[in-house]
Amino acid sequence: MRIGALEGGGTKMVLAVGDETGKIFEQESIPTVSPEETMPRMVDYFRGKNIEALGIATFGPIDVKKESPTYGCVLATPKLIWQGCNFVKPFEDALHIPVGFDTDVNGSCLGEVTYGAAKGLSSVLYYTIGTGVGGGIFVNGKLLHGMLHPEAGHILLNISDKDPGGSVCPFHPNCFEGLCSGPSIQARWGKSAKELADDPEVWELEGDYIAQALVDEVMTLSPQRIILGGGVMHQEQLFPIIRRKFAEYMNGYIKTPELADLDHYIVPASLHDDQGIMGALRLGEIAWEEANQKA
Ligand code: ADP
Ligand code: ZN
């Protein structure tokens, strides 16, 4: 089946056509400008591509509740021109195919669950640590939405006494994103995360914060595996630090075979930064399956 996939980001939109095996036939990116300019360009991309379904995984907050009058819309966001934009309807109206819709991070989580490092598992946590921090959550075989959708990048952490900076989140003086995103690292140390690769204190602190977040999430969600993606996680030296601190903060409280083998429990994203777009393929396929079950 030919499926369209859209991964929406604050700087670029990734558009692709692929199939249910995760194979991508063609892909391109366009800059994220304004809904007036960018939405018609995206709709045009998918026209004539002979796709049977479309999956959209995008930045939020978004309304993912199908029964809501604002389903498909971008909600209150700092990206003000996108606020209120309906991401789903223009595609449904133009293409007349089932459209799946979820957050970018739920999309990435689904990509890893379907095709990657969490294949076959039923409860998985995915975090991206990049320009922002966000969490995608798959529990008991389904992406978690709840009241809105998880905003796991803004869970609160204990500020380390070794932190010479602080939070860059305008809402929270001590949240995960505020303390750990790429821009936060840059603000704290005065250089980009990449340029700080050889500075151990940067990664010791970063690893400490990430481990705190993961312990809290494990206590709450009980995932079978945790996948960490995003630009900052390209610093692979972080993984041993995170696992060591995770074990320290967990302090032996939970005893499972998974936690006895942290090298296979806390792992890097495995799809070469294609987890989002591949997850969007699966979102499209799920929308198609749901539409055909109803029919
Ligand atoms: P986005 O979150 O915008 O989708 P990324 O996941 O690539 O994109 O995140 C970008 C952030 O990641 C930037 O703040 C950048 O400094 C940081 N980053 C990108 N590559 C690296 C790297 N190799 N090492 C450390 N940090 C990186
Ligand atoms: Zn915050």
Image (cartoon, rainbow, N blue to C red):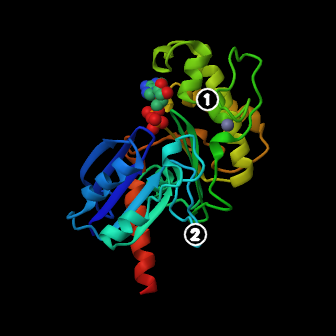
Q: Residue at x 65, y 28 (%)?
A: 179
Residue 229 image offset from top left, x and y in percent: 49, 39
Along the horizontal axis of the image, is 140 left or right of 166?
left
Along the horizontal axis of the image, is 160 left or right of 21?
right
Which of the 4 image quarters holds residue 266?
Answer: top right
Mark 1 — residue? 180
Residue 177 image offset from top left, x and y in percent: 62, 34
Quadrant holding ligand 2?
Answer: top right
Q: Amino acid at mark 2?
A: Pro
Q: Element type at marker 1? A: helix
Q: Is 102 rendered above or below residue 203?
A: below
Q: CA distance from mark 2 to mark 1?
A: 35 Å
Residue 12 image offset from top left, x and y in percent: 38, 41
Q: In the image shown, does 87 or 279 lie closer to the viewer? A: 87
Residue 33 image offset from top left, x and y in percent: 38, 41
Question: Where the C terminus falls, by quadrant?
Answer: bottom left
Label 2 packing within 10 angstroms: few (<14), some (14-19), many (20+): few
Q: In the image shown, does 27 or 23 lie closer to the viewer? A: 27
Residue that sits furthest to the left in the current view? 48
Mark 2 — residue? 69
Asked if the residue at tag 1 contacts the one at tag 2, i.e. Cβ–Cβ closer than 8 Å, the answer is no
Q: Is 1 rendered above or below residue 134?
A: below
Q: Is 153 rendered above or below residue 97?
A: above
Mark on residue 70?
Answer: none
